[in-house]
Image: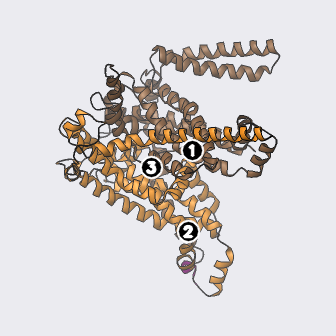
Chain colours: A brown, B orange
Amino acid sequence: MKKILPYLFVLPALAFFMIFFIYPNIDVFRISLYSWDGIGPETFVGTANFERLIGDSGFWSWQLWSLSAICGLAGLALGILFARLTKRGMLRWGVLGFFAGLLGGIFGGGLVGVPAGALERTLVIGIQSIFVQIPIALVIALILHGRIRGARTFAIIAFLPVMISLVALALVWRYMIYDMNVGALNVIVRLFGGQPINWLADMPLLSVVLTTNWIYIGLYVVIFMAALKSIPSAIFDSAKVDGLSGFQTLRRIVIPHINKVILLTCIMCISGTFKAFDLLWVMTGAEASEVHITSTYLVKEMMYGYWGYACAIAVVCFFISLAIVAIQLRAMKIKV
Amino acid sequence: MVERKIEKTVGRRVRRALSYAFMIGFSAIILIPIGLLFMNSLKTGPEVYNNPLAPPSSIVFSNYPDAWNWPNTSIGRGFLNSAMVVSITVLIIAIIAPMAGYSLSRLEFRGRKAIFYIFMAGMFVGGPAIVAMYRLMMGLNLINTYWALILPYVAGAMPFSILMMWTYFSAIPRAIEDSARVDGLSPFKTYWRIMLPQALPALFTICILQVIWIWNEFLLGLIMLKTPDMFTLPLMLTRFAAGTTNYLYFGVFAAGVFISILPLIVIYIIFSDRIQRGMSMQFVKG
């Protein structure tokens, strides 16, 4: 009895987990090699689904990637040139220039109107949230950490949207904020004598990004506040004694202390976008929408009866998130 | 010297005022959409269309019962369906997760580490894998039943719940267990009478987090449920919105959405600290 008891205790959880989590996650790989419509028999098609994915401009656009690759190389050249002229580290500035070019290519190309696919849209939403949500959240966390009155109430309010279902929030934003007739934004536009704008139809990505940022800033505020609490207050005091300005304190003390957490939140921004489904699905009108991120694109393909193809998308996304997790695990081992 | 001090306090005051202004502005931005929702839920449809930003001229409370009993897409029905799915799921999780967490943290057996790593791997990789999940449920003949939701929900909740219980059990001193053994309690009774009661706070946090997560879950329901009568609340909401976001019934729409978020807001206000800590942990890990 004493020998089998530990197994008996762990067995129910393990059984549930193996059958309804591990098994489907493995089965996805198998189904990705089949053609299946969700009802009839499966037929083995080898790598046909993946071949289709490579040529699918709805999933990824080669134009945008070539543009950003060119921009990346140009950035690399500029970075090296700059490093040579100013006698700085070549590798560092080269890599920096390369990534800046890559990002500039994707964002710029998207703005100019180079067709974008679901993958790029996912990356753009994720990367912009790094640059928007994290700095704002850090500022708010620092303000609330400075023992202002009502800090707890402000933190509770900031976190509120994270709690509420994305479906409800998507409906609220779609019909109360962005709507042509009753949306708050258009009421304000009309007040100033402008023509009402159909936000979700004319600038869907911007609208979605705005709502996403509105929801998730509070999450990072709470994470940063917990991280700030772990910095000993004596360090802040000695900074004050040394006469460091607010910005210097931020750069020299706060950021080095919580850099691990900041890196983690950056990764969360990107990997979270790969899982985001509800918001975009409800806000932009389900499978009929033309604006997709990877997860909604997958479900759209399912709804149209390409279940094997949907699995191929899932497999590709799995490897992308695996890469992100690898970075995450490495990042978490960084000694502060 | 005195002047410098005055300068410093003035600077501090200005900074303080700016901080408050910024925080109040930010809070307003967060609260306005939700406040707007509540305000419009008390108006008639035409009144909303007339001016969505104006306060209600007279409070129309009947929007709430109307939304609750709306024909074909009754919010009340969705509410009760969701409540049922949530309670069954959380009950199962609350029974099996602490047992597994206890076993993995406190009992010695072969393969303990391997099993622990299997659970933890699930925290980082993988997701709902909906196509394969649908196939599995088709094989089990469970499509369009609540089991097609409950079983994956329980499985998906395991890694985080077990980790939380594991951490909590690991922190309880061994002496307590030893004295129970000396008193002649069987291992099962030691768990049930001594260890589990001590871990109740952690168990409670897990349950609240799962209630929130399952109450809000949308994708799995979208794939698995076919009969509108069985729809969970998020599914029902999308259908409900399609029929009510018009000139006549916009107030009813707002009331329906507000009913759907009200339970979580209440839970959140009561347990905000616990939820914030737990949820940010969950997001960091997932």
Rate crowding at label 1 as few (under 14), some (14 to 19) or many (20 or more) other CA atoms within 10 Å. Answer: many
Q: CA distance from mark 2 to mark 1?
A: 41 Å
From the image, tell me which residue sits under label 1.
A221
Residue at (61%, 45%) from the top-left corner?
Answer: A224
Q: CA distance from mark 3 to mark 1?
A: 14 Å
Count of numbered tags: 3
Numbered range of the magenta stretch: B184-189
Residue at (52%, 77%) from the top-left corner?
Answer: B192
Image mark for residue A163? 3
Name the quadrant containing residue A172. Answer: top left
Looking at the rendered structure, whether the residues under marks 2 and 3 are on a common chain is answered as: yes
Instruction: Specify the subunit that label 2 lies on.
Output: A
Rate crowding at label 2 as few (under 14), some (14 to 19) or many (20 or more) other CA atoms within 10 Å. Answer: many
From the image, tell me which residue sits under label 2.
A7
Residue A306 position within the rendered picture, expressed as x and y whole percent measured from the top left: 35, 32
Give the side of residue B257 with respect to residue A296, left or right: left
Residue A137 position within the rendered picture, expressed as x and y whole percent measured from the top left: 57, 39
Q: CA distance from mark 2 to mark 3?
A: 36 Å
